[in-house]
Amino acid sequence: METKKVLPVLFLVMFLVMVGFGIIIPVMPFLAEKVGGSPTELGLLMAVYSLMQLLFAPMWGRISDRIGRKPVMMIGIAGLALSFFIMATADSLWVLFVARIVGGVLSSANMPTAMAYVADITTPEDRGKGMGIIGAATGLGFIFGPAIGGIFSKSSLNLPFYIAGISSLITLILVFIILKESLTVEKRSQHSKNKESMWKAFNGPLSIMFILQLIITLSMAGLETTFAYFAAQKANISLVQLGYIFMIMGFGSAIVQGGLVGRMTKKYGEGAVIRIGIIVSAIGFILILFSNNFWTSAVFLTIFGLGNGFIRPAISALLTKNSTTGHGSVTGLLSSFDSFGRIAGPPIGGWLFSISIDLPFISGAMLSVFALVLYQIYHAQTKQVKAFV
């Protein structure tokens, strides 16, 4: 299987998946309100999706090791489409909850399977590049999705959900026709016989990488939750300007993931790229405290986004290269830790913001320093293990 031909297809698939997901983001609060939901219930609607991803991503990753990537990816995309169509026709709050639970359970198959697919088709040297391309597709989908959702919601609150559902069905057809299975029959058979716990991936020095990803996601989710309030108070930023700021950051992060990560991991190794990403993110957190207008807010948030863009693809590449469990098991477990950070980050960030508006960003910088220390511990432990071998 030619990696150069497959990666653009996988990029398109993940881009369309995330566009579909992003379309509903600006509309969801208004639809929840329309069917009688309170702000607290909206928060639960958002949280239940991440909770399902936390619980089911490792399971789907493990299943993809046994039956192949393509069928599991198709289950994930079909689940996403189904949840969008249920939301489009929802006339009560409980139906929305059903849609979010169904979507969370089934679509949690998408990210770990896509990352495992990349790990299957890339050499260890090119692994960072492949993971970066998936990250770039995800980031760009999150930029274009909400913009499309915002435009179409003006005519009807239900229309963006139908568009998201149709987009997911088109993606499903693309996967069925174009994407070839990446996991050989021999590998699938080998994983089927393996009865070890999926938690085997969380073992030895590698376990530190999962915790590091959790910390990075936790700090980022806290920032995403509070930055709008912070920018409005500190720099008098409007909602429209905020959209542009996040768009600039998203493009910066996508360029890093799609273009720089691969070259840098190939030249310097994943460890160096993770360290650079953490340091740049920490600098971004500190600089955000000095935002006082649109441009300083945009530049400082983008510096954070650039740093963050280095980390996830490099961690994914490092884990799939060094773990002895199946690629699906390790990427599923990584997605689970990521989801946990997305669940815990917003309430912690909101609580810190209520104490002081600077606190989410100060704590983000402190967590980045802690992540850097964790990486150094991982590096030292890995050297010790190699010395014994």
Image: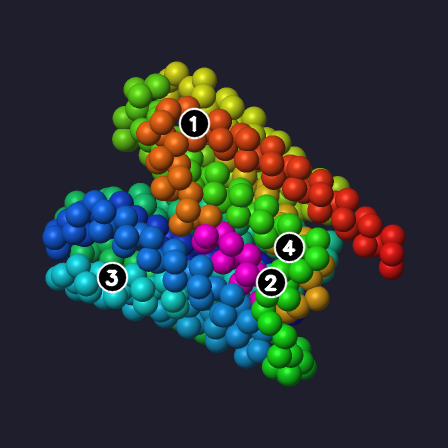
| Magenta span: chief secondary structure | helix
Q: Secondary structure at mark 2?
A: helix
> What amino acid is found at the position of numbered circle 2 in the picture?
Val
Image position of 148 with respect to 192: above or below:
above
- The residue drawn where x is 36% and y is 27% is 355
* Image depth: mark 3 or mark 1 in front: 1
> What amino acid is found at the position of numbered circle 4 in the picture?
Ser
Q: Secondary structure at mark 4?
A: helix
Where does the C terminus fall, quadrant-wise?
bottom right
Name the residue that disc number 3 marks.
Answer: 97
Give 374 or 277, whichever is nearer the viewer: 374
How far is mark 4 from mark 1, CA to CA? 29 Å
Reading the chain from its start, which is encountered first: label 1 or label 2?
A: 2
Reading the chain from its start, which is encountered first: label 3 or label 1?
A: 3
* Image depth: mark 2 or mark 4 in front: 4
Q: Callout 4: few (<14), some (14-19), or many (20+) C-alpha neighbours within 10 Å?
A: some
Image x and y of residue 358, in percent: 41, 24
Provide the residue span drawn in magenta: 327-340
Reading the chain from its start, which is encountered first: label 4 or label 1?
A: 4
Q: Are marks 2 and 4 in contact (CB under 8 Å)?
A: no
Which color scheme does this rendered protein use? rainbow
Name the residue that disc number 1 marks.
Answer: 359
Res 330 label? 2
How far is mark 3 from mark 1, CA to CA? 33 Å
Q: Is residue 139 left or right of residue 213?
A: left
